Image: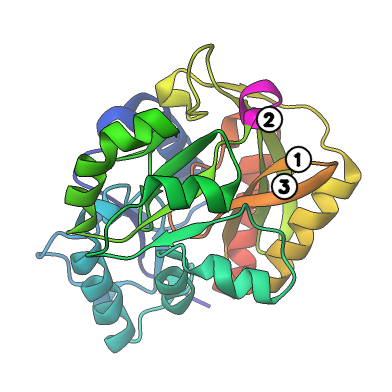
Amino acid sequence: MQIQQIAIVTCQSLGSYTSNAESEDDNLFRFLEAKGLPVSWQVWDDENVDWSRFDFIIIKSPWDYFDKIDAFYTWLNHLETLNCKVLNPVKTMRWNADKLYFKDMQTEGIKVVQTVWLEQGSSFDAHAAFAELKSGKIIVKPRVSGGAKNTFALTLDEALAKTDEINRLLQTEPFLAQPFIEEIKTEGEWSFIFFNGNYSHTVLKTAKPGDFRVQHFFGGTIHTPQPPEHLLATARNIADKFARNCLYARVDGVALNNQLELMELELIEPFLFLHTSEGSLERYYQALMAQLQ
């Protein structure tokens, strides 16, 4: 088939992600361009873009979408109305934007880190959250989130002191609470990357001493060990069930009692750690060509 134009979606500013994101994005763009694909960068919320003129739209780095979630949903609806061919599919991204998708995954037997749901407009009850999660420390974060924004790691005393702030945040959006998992600090968080349903590579992310955030822009480090086969098998099962027809998927989880528990399934704008694995750009390209056909 003759492809005239392919949009690769980004955002106005990559903010604190810039150094790593620009490197990955630039390398991917140059690789696809060298393969002869007619690619161009487009900002998702640029009102001057005519999305109907693109044969395909690849969602890569709209990393401010969670700050503008209503506008993002409106944009997805617009693409759907135009019948645009979007990678990943609009329906999948809409489902994946809100962590309520955990409930769908649990229904299918996927082990997800225990979660207490804090509805918008409700009041945060620290004692009740700690009692339900049975943890000496908890994580509180928005249901629609990214980059550890408005994410708190709290003991009970800290949670009581933060209650007013959390309640103010709850007036604008729903949150969730989860147990603080020490294994993320001591052993790290796994990320398994798949292209078009096929396994590509794995990284293990660890937080810097004294922090709980594994993201590289918060000082976390990235390792590339060979993943245990049983953890990879669980990640593969998750991708098979919930990332059908997706160009890319990233399964984030932590090993607890020798089993992978899901932290997040990234189907909208994951950093893909392409620089960590030889051949990953080629695998991405081959997956893309299969989708374009």
Identify the residue shown where x is 63% and y is 70%: 105
**What whole-number distance in Å separates the C-alpha atoms at marks 3 and 1?**
20 Å
Side of 256 relative to 69 (left or right): right
- Mark 2 residue crowding within 10 angstroms, few (<14) / some (14–19) / many (20+): few
Q: Residues within 10 Å of mark 1 (few under 14, many from 20)?
A: some
Tell me residue 40's x, y (percent). Answer: 32, 53
Can you identify the residue that label 3 sits on? 200
Residue 146, image x and y in percent?
Answer: 38, 46
Placement of 130 over or under 249, stated as above or below: above
Q: Is residue 251 magenta?
A: no
Marks 3 and 2, Cα distance to the nearest angstrom?
25 Å
> Quick check: can you spot residue 246?
yes
For badge 2, the amino acid type reads Glu
The residue carrying mark 1 is 255
Q: Position of residue 222 (x, y in %)?
A: 61, 24
Q: Of 203 and 46, which appears nearest the observer?
A: 203
Secondary structure category for the residue under label 1: strand
Helix, strand or loop: magenta stretch:
helix
- Residue ID at (76%, 48%): 260
Mark toward the viewer: 3 or 1: 1
Picture quadrant where residue 187 is located = top right
Figure quadrant of the C terminus: bottom right
Foreground residue among 11 and 175:
175
- State left or right for residue 145 relative to residue 271: left
Range of residues picked out in magenta: 182-187
Find numbered disc 3 in the image and state the secondary structure of the residue it sits on.
strand
The structure residue drawn at horizontal position 72% and vertical position 65%, both measured from the top left corner, is 110
Q: Earlier in the sequence, mark 3 or mark 2?
A: 2
Mark 1 or 2, nearer chain start: 2
Question: Mark 1 near mark 2, Cβ–Cβ under 8 Å?
Answer: yes
Q: Quickly name the residue at label 2.
A: 183
Residue 162 sits in quarter: top left
